[in-house]
Amino acid sequence: MSGKTLEIRHLNTSFFTQKGEVGAAKDICLEVRPGQIVGIVGESGCGKSVTARSVMGLVKYPGRVVSGEILLNGTRITGISKKEACSLRGSEVSMIFQEPMTSLNPVIKVGRQVEEVLLIHKKITKKEAKKEAAKILEAVGISDVASRMECYPHQLSGGLRQRVMIAMAMICSPSLLIADEPTTALDVTVEAQILRLMKKLCEAGTSILLISHNLGVIAQVCDYVYVMYAGRIVEQGETFTLFDHPAHPYTRGLLGAAKSLRSDAGLLKTIPGVVPNLLHLPAGCSFSPRCDSCMDLCRSEMPDMLPAGEKGHLTRCWRS
Ligand SMILES: Nc1ncnc2c1ncn2[C@@H]1O[C@H](COP(=O)(O)OP(=O)(O)O)[C@@H](O)[C@H]1O
Ligand SMILES: [Mg+2]
């Protein structure tokens, strides 16, 4: 297949707060091709969710997309009407969130909620919707579907609730699924099951944008990865390249922290310092105050994305 499922061109999304404009996503350029699982990774607060919400047209007030273009299967979706955006959501692109409980209605049985999505987007009878809902719930690995459909969300485990969310997201066969920290609230066994399910969905034709602060999750399923720091992409590349030859000191720091978590060294390695306040970013490279290979140039000028060796491997670092 050719073409791009998702293309983000120079996206800038800001929050207009009383203290000033907070640039939460800055000059984001990103692609998801058909059949790919693409990851966005970075510490909390670096702009992952804001980027995803910009694609969905779901940035919360006082935030908004300031500039840039977003294309879905070649069609520009920035600047479209609310009504058009609404019809795209669910049918062409859908999103799942970290805590399914906040997206499911607590007082409606889960079966009904899955059927609702179908009834909104498709010309279909209630009876057909019920049948299709059961089919998709089974496809996402829920057993004993008939009785589960009669449950309220709180009667299901976290893993089952996330499966219901995935079923709702997948029911209209969108070409793109955006999964924002879909396994963060789950234990590792259930996490592994959900990640396997994502791989299956991708093999069945859905492109996926997977967001996680956890490099392990990204490494397990993604083909290509973007690393974000303080609102910007700082490194991108094929998963293997990026993990074997990280080019940005921040990516190396994340990898070091992830490795020390897995070893029994007893000492948790972290990146020194904290993520800067987006309202008071340092001059030059945003990572420079935390970087152990920082030069004078880094404190005065922000580098562009520069080639880092392998094809498609780029890094925002003067030392590359
Ligand atoms: N409602 C808001 N008002 C002001 N700033 C916000 C708001 N929501 C998010 N931000 C800013 O956007 C940044 C990125 O947020 P987010 O995309 O949720 O981070 P991530 O998903 O990577 O943890 C935050 O660090 C914060 O500075
Ligand atoms: Mg987030």
Image: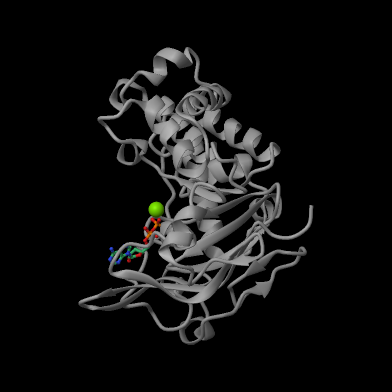
Residue appearing at x 50%, y 15% in the figure? 143
Rendering coords of residue 137 (x, y %):
51, 25
Q: Is residue 200 above or below residue 10?
A: above
Rendering coords of residue 13 (x, y %):
42, 71
Instruction: Judge by depth and name the residue closer to the eye, 168 or 312.
Output: 168
Rendering coords of residue 116 (x, y %):
41, 35
- The quarter holding residue 219 reads top right
Residue appearing at x 44%, y 67% in the figure? 81
* Image side of residue 175 versus residue 51, left or right: right
Instruction: Judge by depth and name the residue closer to the eye, 297 or 216.
Output: 216
Looking at the figure, which quarter contains the C terminus? bottom right
Colour scheme in the image? one colour
Residue appearing at x 37%, y 73% in the figure? 14
* Image side of residue 44 versus residue 188, left or right: left
Instruction: Judge by depth and name the residue closer to the eye, 208 or 134.
Output: 134
- The quarter holding residue 220 reads top right
- The quarter holding residue 9 reads bottom right
Rendering coords of residue 77 (x, y %):
54, 66
Residue appearing at x 42%, y 53% in the figure? 270
Q: In the rendered picture of this protein, how many numbered marks are placed on residues?
A: 0
* Image side of residue 188 versus residue 177, left or right: left
Query: Residue lying farthest left?
Result: 18
Q: In this view, does 223 lie above or below 271?
A: above
The answer to whether one can see residue 307 in this image is: yes
The answer to whether one can see residue 263 in this image is: no
Q: In this view, does 169 lie above or below 189?
A: below
Instruction: Judge by depth and name the residue closer to the eye, 269 or 202.
Output: 202
